[in-house]
Image (cartoon, rainbow, N blue to C red):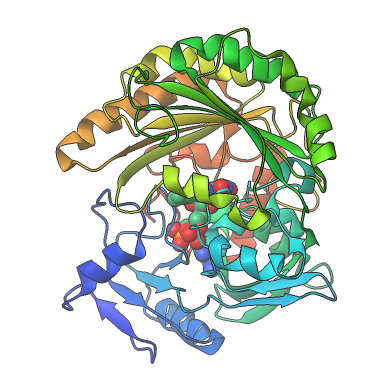
Amino acid sequence: MRTDSPRLTRSDPGFEKRLADLVFNQLPVDRRPDVVVRPRTEQDVVDTVRAARRDGHQVAVLSGGHSWIAAPVREGGVLIDMSAFDGVDVDAERRRLRVGPAARSSAIVPAVAAHGLAYSSGHCGTPGAGGYLLGGGIGVNSGHWKPACYSVRSVRVVTAEGELVVASESENRDLLWLARGAGPLFPGVVTEFELDLQDRPVDTRVSSWVFDHEHLAAVSAWVSRVSATLPSYVEVFTAAGGPGRHDHLPSEGYPDRIVTVLATAYVDTEAEARAALAPFADGPGVEPLACTDLAPVAYEDLSASFDAEYPDGHRYLADAFWTDLDAAGAMVPLADAFVRAPSGLSNFVALMPGNGKQVGLDPRAGAYSMDHRTLVMAYALWTDPAADEANARWIEEMSAILAPLSVGNFVSEADHERHPERLERSFSPESWRRLTELRSTWDPDGLFHLPGRPR
Ligand SMILES: Cc1cc2nc3c(=O)[nH]c(=O)nc-3n(C[C@H](O)[C@H](O)[C@H](O)COP(=O)(O)OP(=O)(O)OC[C@H]3O[C@@H](n4cnc5c(N)ncnc54)[C@H](O)[C@@H]3O)c2cc1C
């Protein structure tokens, strides 16, 4: 395939290393594109898509490389590496942000915070804006601000025809609808997103409690009960994790498995935070091993603790389910399987974005349509290649427990590779119908690859 952009083909020295460097997950995949192309301008993207079309290659797109399943790495065809598109431009007056798809929250958040602004940035700072926003974007304060894709105002897209178009409320609205949540089904290459910004919460406060995992039932019941009384700007994670993850806890006499509750109030004063988190005061009836009370954490520092949980240089398997059960109903059935995790680094997490209520998504505005009670995500992480099979068996065991309890999946974190049916289950039936229709309109020849599905 001829293109002026830098490119590497399978037979080039450095191809394997380049591919590995682009992908966050170190768990190897047995798929290889024929060529990796790194465009630097929108015209390069246009030329690359046209050349791929002409030569009969399928196309996959990589921005931040943080798909858990290495979704952009397909067998054969062209991988468009968008890593050069990492610009961040804040228009403070209009409260708008323009970002390239390879920009990461870790770069975007300080830029918007410097203007007293914010958006629902990822809980981790490392994923690229491309996959994060296209997949919905469940980030900070998303129960209040809504998933990040709903703040997307416009996108610049190179279509399957190789045309550069803008999608906004006034032109190509269908494509904007797709950009708000179609995830890996998006039929184009996004070169830039424009987002609305929010006021940065002035005094974000975090309270946390750490318990022995044996109290999971009591703790998750407490979280479920309290959540129902919380305002939408309080976000509560309940996470079951392994040993060695909490440096601030005593190293001796400390259990192998713990449950952490992390409640964040996105507010402007300590008094507001105190009032918002007051319903936690009664406790679950068991003593925490450790706790913090209303610790101030700046918006721009929120991702640090999440990034530490999901470090570089590890092998990962992940899966994610929506359920209409509360946190207790979703977590307790996993308790026994969790203690059998081969890796002490593995964990599972429950988040009730609307604190038990619906967040309130408009299905006409975006493809992202999962508005359910609880999101449960299971993560296996390890480093030893000899443990690959054991970890794969474990995540399947966790998923097999969750699947019958679930009403669907989260498109950005579900394992579509091993379970392609999870793509459809990541949307409401109406949104899925519209999505597949629009995909055939915008990509009638199936130029863009799909995870888990060879052409
Ligand atoms: C450590 C970690 C933390 C995470 N935390 C969160 C979180 O807090 N909230 C959340 O919602 N998700 C989270 N995720 C999931 C993450 O948002 C998705 O995996 C997302 O797809 C990653 O985006 P990326 O651009 O880095 O991915 P990539 O692997 O580069 O791309 C993934 C897919 O997105 C599509 N895509 C990417 N860029 C483009 C583009 N420019 N044009 C068209 N299609 C494109 C392609 O289909 C591609 O296969 C996390 C993932 C990891 C690994």
Q: Nearer the viewer, residue 307 or 71?
A: 307
The single residue placed furthest to the top in the displayed view is 285
- Give x and y (percent) for residue 324: 67, 22
State the residue at coordinates (39%, 26%).
Answer: 250
Residue 41, placed above or below residue 284: below
State the residue at coordinates (50%, 57%).
Answer: 127
The single residue placed furthest to the bottom in the displayed view is 4
Residue 121 relative to residue 171: left or right: left
Is residue 360 visible in the rendered image? The answer is no
Residue 206, placed above or below residue 94: above
Is residue 85 visible in the rendered image? The answer is yes
- Give x and y (percent) for residue 300: 63, 58
Count the marks: how many?
Answer: 0
- Give x and y (percent) for residue 78: 36, 72
Q: Nearer the viewer, residue 33 or 208?
A: 208
Q: Nearer the viewer, residue 381 or 413?
A: 381
Q: Nearer the viewer, residue 309 or 301?
A: 301
Residue 132, placed above or below residue 11: above
Question: Where, quadrant-wise, is the N terminus in this rendering?
Answer: bottom left
Residue 357 relative to residue 10: left or right: right
State the residue at coordinates (28%, 30%).
Answer: 343
Quarter of the image holding residue 39? Answer: bottom left
Question: Where, quadrant-wise, is the C terminus in this rendering?
Answer: bottom left
Residue 428 relative to residue 74: left or right: right
State the residue at coordinates (82%, 67%).
Answer: 169
Residue 396 relative to residue 325: left or right: left
- Give x and y (percent) for residue 302: 60, 50
Quarter of the image holding residue 159? Answer: bottom right
